Amino acid sequence: MTEFLHMGGYAAYIWSAYGITALVLTLSLVLPIIENKNTRKRIEQMLEQEQD
């Protein structure tokens, strides 16, 4: 197990690459969801203002 985690001396490069990839993929999923919610709220506010 230690040899696997050490990755033949390249552990810092490999694990940081995995970490960055995981971060980018997570943000690629989460940010559009947040933006969608914000856009829906803005549209609802605009519609409410038009009705008044």
Image (tube, helix red, strand yellow):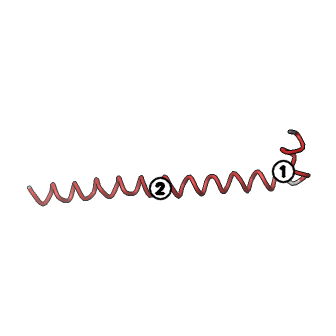
In this rendering, would 46 be left or right of 17?
left
Point out residue 9 in the picture as x, y percentages from the top left corner: 91, 52
Q: 38 or 18, which is in the foreground?
A: 18
Q: Residue at x 66, y 57 (%)?
A: 21
Point out residue 6 in the picture as x, y percentages from the top left corner: 87, 46
Ranked by sequence position, the earlier of labels 1 and 2 is 1
Point out residue 34 in the picture as x, y percentages from the top left corner: 41, 52
Q: Residue furthest left?
A: 52
Instruction: Count neighbours of disc 1 (C-alpha within 10 A) and say few if under 14, some if 14 to 19, many if 20 or more.
Output: some
Q: Residue at x 50, y 55 (%)?
A: 29
Instruction: Count neighbours of disc 2 (C-alpha within 10 A) and say few if under 14, some if 14 to 19, many if 20 or more.
Output: few
Q: Residue at x 35, y 52 (%)?
A: 37
In this rendering, would 23 be left or right of 44?
right
For the residues labelled 1 and 2, say whether their Cβ atoms are less than 8 Å apart: no
Q: Residue at x 84, y 50 (%)?
A: 11
Identify the mark at residue 31; answer none if there is no mark: 2
**Residue at label 1?**
11
Label 2 SS: helix
Cα distance in 3D space between marks 1 and 2: 29 Å
In this rendering, would 51 be left or right of 31?
left
Point out residue 38 in the picture as x, y percentages from the top left corner: 34, 54
Q: Kindly indicate the quadrant of the structure image that contains residue 1.
A: top right
Identify the mark at residue 37; answer none if there is no mark: none
Label 1 SS: helix
- The quarter of the image holding the C terminus is bottom left
- Amino acid carrying label 2: it is Leu
Query: How many marks on residues?
Result: 2
- Amino acid carrying label 1: it is Ala
